[in-house]
Image (cartoon, coloured by chain):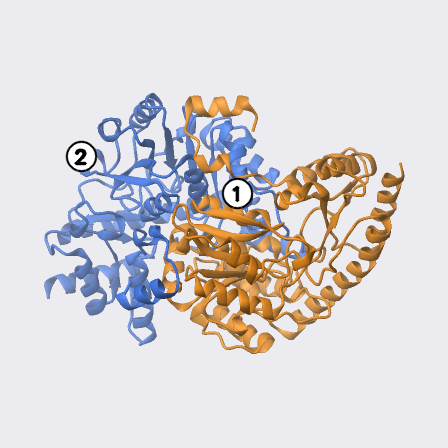
Chain colours: A blue, B orange
Amino acid sequence: MSSDVKNSISKNFNLAQRMEEINSFLVVDFITRAKTLEEQGKSIINLAVGEPDFPTPEPLIKAAIIALENNQIKYTPSLGGSVLREELAGWYRTRYEVDIDPNRVAVTSGSTAALVLVMGVILSPGDEVLMADPGYPCNRNIVRAMEGRTISVPVGPDTSYQLTAELIKKNWTQNTVAALVASPSNPTGTLVSDRELRLMHKVVQGFGGSLIVDEIYHGLTFGIDAKSALNFTENVFVINSFSKYFGMTGWRLGWAVAPKPFIPELEKLAQNLYISNSDIAQQAALAAFRPETIAIAEKNRAEYEKQKNYLLPRLREMGFIIPVDPQGAFYIYADCSNFTNDSYRFCVEILETVGVAIAPGADFGEFRAKHHVRFSYPKPIKVLSEGLERLEKFLKS
Amino acid sequence: MSSDVKNSISKNFNLAQRMEEINSFLVVDFITRAKTLEEQGKSIINLAVGEPDFPTPEPLIKAAIIALENNQIKYTPSLGGSVLREELAGWYRTRYEVDIDPNRVAVTSGSTAALVLVMGVILSPGDEVLMADPGYPCNRNIVRAMEGRTISVPVGPDTSYQLTAELIKKNWTQNTVAALVASPSNPTGTLVSDRELRLMHKVVQGFGGSLIVDEIYHGLTFGIDAKSALNFTENVFVINSFSKYFGMTGWRLGWAVAPKPFIPELEKLAQNLYISNSDIAQQAALAAFRPETIAIAEKNRAEYEKQKNYLLPRLREMGFIIPVDPQGAFYIYADCSNFTNDSYRFCVEILETVGVAIAPGADFGEFRAKHHVRFSYPKPIKVLSEGLERLEKFLKS
């Protein structure tokens, strides 16, 4: 924020303390700049935005059109309609072979709302949450919004860029109340092993804390069907979303599965902070678990895998260091220290000179952030190929 | 919360302090109970839920269907698409004859999100916000969620159940940073006069604080076209919604107009707490300002006025005390002290014996709450008539 703006605020109004510590995403600046360049007639390859390239699967669109034709788009219960909650429980039964009481499922306005609600019901001011650095930037800002404190634990290739039971033990203090794990991770696409997840759960339980597992990219894994944390415990907050696997980004619908005693608390907070989720999104999502939708989602997943298999070796050949193969999501987190010590500037130069948008490491934390960039690759191979050619040109210049 | 549940939480997990002070809405219990009774075959007249009885206007439905057929439902900028922000600025120009920079409009996931974001960017822990008691219950819970404190100022018929400049002056402390005014008010349907609003603004500015004006029920006024606070100042947060006047409750779309220096702050927080609003709702809302949509909204408003004119004198005849004629929204806040000193129990008995659901005063604050109930009346006259007959039967029994 410019000092002019700051002065203008402080002269007339109060600004909340939290806003000094909540950052905007650098990637948004890159996407905005990319759009401006496009409007100026430049050709841009956008590998910055974390959004599936495919449209929403047709069965969901059809269900939404029927809902619109019925024109009954009204407030729904704050934790979602009961039929959708049952469908989600059914999804855990068929996909993960685990029985979940539908009353433990909280449908939310995107997984972001699920995280806001979970943090809202567990964090008092000053309470600490452990999470991996690098990690998804909203998470620490949501913790800050709720007056908690994020303890960023630096992680690297040795732990597949994930927290471990050991790291949790080492970093837990008397103020820590929770640990947040994302598997597959954004930005690294790496998974936590079942074994390590169980160990982490045991450690967190031992401290009397809460384990939160972000499973937003579940379904989008390659050569492995990741288990849910719900496969081995009820004492966990699991966060998930219709945005990625089901291709519903712009609809704003996600969910949390929570330990039963927390459901009335989540409901209370959801009533006040959201009133209701999008009814049209919920009516569409009722078609998410039909075989014809899953067939489309699986076809898309196969495409992401092809794209990853295309991009990964080529980036390595080019000199990017990617020590751990991503196993899911649609991201590659690449060490660019062969080319630069300032990944932000590196990203700016790549965008300005050859028109390829990628995200700088600084969006995902501080640990070795200046030596990393994130490629978001859900694009047709020919687009990726063009992006690689341009990158090569840039690196050779 | 039962003590069993509390024990179960504290044994295994932490519960945030805020959750001890955030309440669920009693009206939800009444709506749930009403549904159960209906499922048991009982006939219920629901005057509890604060939702328009009319469906979403057809032009919005059609716009949404076209958007679905195009199947480009994606993340949008966090403060809304630029075209919708311009349309909203245009709405202020045509409806209020005031020029608003479109960049000062923040499109949000319902007016609830607008309030969360505004409170999020102005409140530090312990900061106080003045608001009227009775008032809309979410407001104080949102303040609590953001670690602020609500100072509830008892208001009665003498000030049309509204804050005044005098009351703000009297209740402002060194910890106060904002005053929140709702006009028309939920639950009372009363307005703040232009003159009083200007005076309040002057007082709040004098203290160096922020004035927040909830204009969610704007458009739904009777015999008067309420001015916006934006008609006389840029230094105000105005909250509004597509839910009520435009009949889009289940779509989750609202907006705030903010002082310019706060827009980057609201954007930062929106990026983190919401990522994006519902794209389908935004694409639908682009049809909100067309003459054919406004014609439908105005027709509905005329119906609400007829319903109010039907209900108000009859409730008075029956013995309910309603000292100030409501001038907007679709609520009547009635003093029921001729019948009871416990409006909660009164509401329970009415629901259980004659099947009419109304909301107890306790949902809207503490001041004389036990002597008040709220009627939410957007229902066909014949439904209201049946409700009145049943009420009469109850009161005579």
Q: Which amino acid does label 1 sit on?
A: Ala
Count numbered badges in the picture: 2
- Secondary element under disc 1, as helix, strand or loop, is helix
**Which residue is disc 1 drawn over?**
A270
Q: Position of residue B341 (x, y in %)?
A: 74, 38
Is residue A276 in view? Answer: no
**Which residue is disc 2 drawn over?**
A158
- Residue in the picture at 41% in, 48% down: A300
Q: Where is residue A210 in the image (x, y as percent from the top left)?
A: 38, 30
Residue placed most toward the observer, B11 or B374: B374
Q: Distance between the residues labelled 1 and 2?
A: 39 Å
Q: Where is residue B163 in the image (x, y as percent from the top left)?
A: 58, 58
Horizontal side of B49 relative to B179 (left or right) equals right
Identify whether B142 is placed above or below A225: below
Is residue B238 in view? Answer: yes
- Secondary element under disc 2, as helix, strand or loop, is helix
